Image (spheres, rainbow, N blue to C red):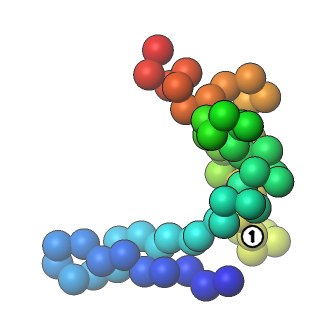
Amino acid sequence: MKLQPKKGNGGHITSYRLIIGSREARDAGFVQADGTTMELKKTVDQEHRRIIIELADEGSTDKDKDN
């Protein structure tokens, strides 16, 4: 797995992308059976050099953010 750099207008790297496959996302519970994506929480653990992605709240979906 590799980070993919994304460059801004000045040509400098402004962010990185990491691809999660659709099956991985479903298996992790990030996507409901109807295809609705769940709201996620990202935690950066500098001490252990890891980024943790997990469900933000067991009952919230991306649709809930608009309300």
Residue 65, position as x, y percentages in the image: 50, 25
Residue that lies at the very extreme toward the front in this rendered image: 34
* Residue beneath the point at 66% across and 34% down: 34
Tell me if residue 66 comes above or below residue 23 in the rendering. above
SS label for mark 1: strand
Residue 38 in view of the camera: no
Residue that lies at the very extreme toward the top in this rendered image: 67
Q: Nearer the viewer, residue 3 or 33?
A: 33
Tell me if residue 42 comes above or below residue 59 in the rendering. below
Residue 36, position as x, y percentages in the image: 61, 35
Q: Nearer the viewer, residue 26 or 47?
A: 26
Residue 22, position as x, y percentages in the image: 66, 59
* Residue beneath the point at 25% across and 72% down: 8
Name the quarter where the N terminus is drawn.
Answer: bottom right
Q: Nearer the viewer, residue 25 or 45?
A: 25
- Left or right of residue 14: residue 26: right
Residue that lies at the very extreme toward the left in this rendered image: 10
What's the residue type where badge 1 is placed? Arg
Tag 1 residue:
50
Corner quadrant of residue 47: bottom right
* Residue beneath the point at 72% across and 37% down: 32
* Residue beneath the point at 57% across and 71% down: 18
